[in-house]
Amino acid sequence: MLRRRLVPVAVLGLGGLALAGAAPASARPAAPGKPAAIGKTAALGKRTLHVGSRGPDVRLLQRELTLAGVRTHADGQYGPLTARHVAMFEREQNLKPADGVFRPSDVVPLSEAADASVAGGAQAFQGGSSPGRSRPSTPAAAPAPLAAGDRAQLQPDGTAIAPASAPLAVQQMIQAGNQIAKLPYRYGGGHVDNFQDDAYDCSGSVSYSLHGAGLLASPDDSTGLEGFGSAGPGRWVTIYANADHTLMFVAGLRFDTSGATAAGSRWQTASRDLSGYVVRHPNGL
């Protein structure tokens, strides 16, 4: 029978994490001489987190991953995409096993990475379509850049920059779309209760972006999106849906799984044949 061994805690830097108890015997040992951090609102380290876990500690983990550069949607639910981002962080930190399970012994490395990123001196890790690769980035806590004018701009890396004049909801839709822009296509992908998946189909992709702006509570299929919002094109967002496919235009950029393989991203500047679709838009947008 395994017994838990309690260890003392001490303050660490800016990250705001808490190591509340020792890891089980199977957990990775913490690096010697590295104290744990004490958080303000929720504590990491009280339990091992994995797919299916949920709660304020999961939300804190997701926020700290974003601070460390692995952009993760903070919804408090540990889905496959969160596990993928944890595994990416574990690989970059050379933590073993790098299996997407967040153990109490991972708290210190994550806290240090988040602290370094906030301080502006980190080699941050950015989530995307190439797990295991790291590259320098600006601290994830910094505001997303905005483009001049009223049209979104497609970047060389396949992400989009929202226009500065766009409503906040449009900016949030673009930020959410960026998180999955280069993830693979899979039929039925994204149609899970917490929107977290490792691949997304057409309606799952549109649903994820809408959810990022708080416009959709659960994923909808293409037929369901035929009734979303209001009829006709929108000022900022226009959704095209029929029984077979869904896509949308956000601030002038097309967000579409069709053509994403060739373009390298769901965000595309080219238009396409739009006949045979029901045209909808989010209310007010």
Image (cartoon, rainbow, N blue to C red):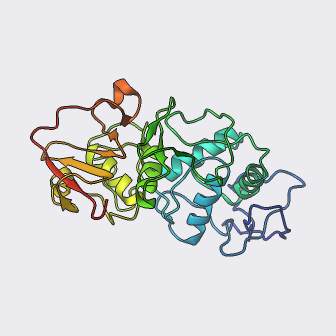
Tell me residue 176's x, y (percent): 44, 51
Which of the image's four quarters has the N terminus?
bottom right
State the quadrant of the C terminus. bottom left
Residue closest to the eye, 1 or 61: 61
> Outermost residue toward the right?
33
Image: 10 above or below 181 = below
Residue furthest out toward the bottom: 41
Residue 47 falls left or right of residue 282: right
Q: Is residue 97 visible?
A: no
Q: Position of residue 151 (x, y in %)?
A: 41, 43
- Which residue corresponds to the image point at 19% horizontal and 62% vertical from the top-left? 230
Is 249 above or below relative to 262? below
Q: 92 or 63, which is in the foreground? A: 63
Q: Which is nearer the eye, 185 or 9?
A: 185
Quarter of image, res 225: bottom left
| Residue 69 visible to the viewer | yes
Count of marks placed on residues: 0
Left or right side of 143 for 243: left
Q: Residue farthest to the top?
A: 262
Rendered location of residue 22, percent (x, y)? 75, 66
Q: What residue appears at the point 17 percent right and 54 percent down from the top-left corner?
A: 232
Is residue 131 shown above or below 224?
above
**Which residue is at the far left?**
276
Q: Position of residue 216 (x, y in %)?
A: 32, 63
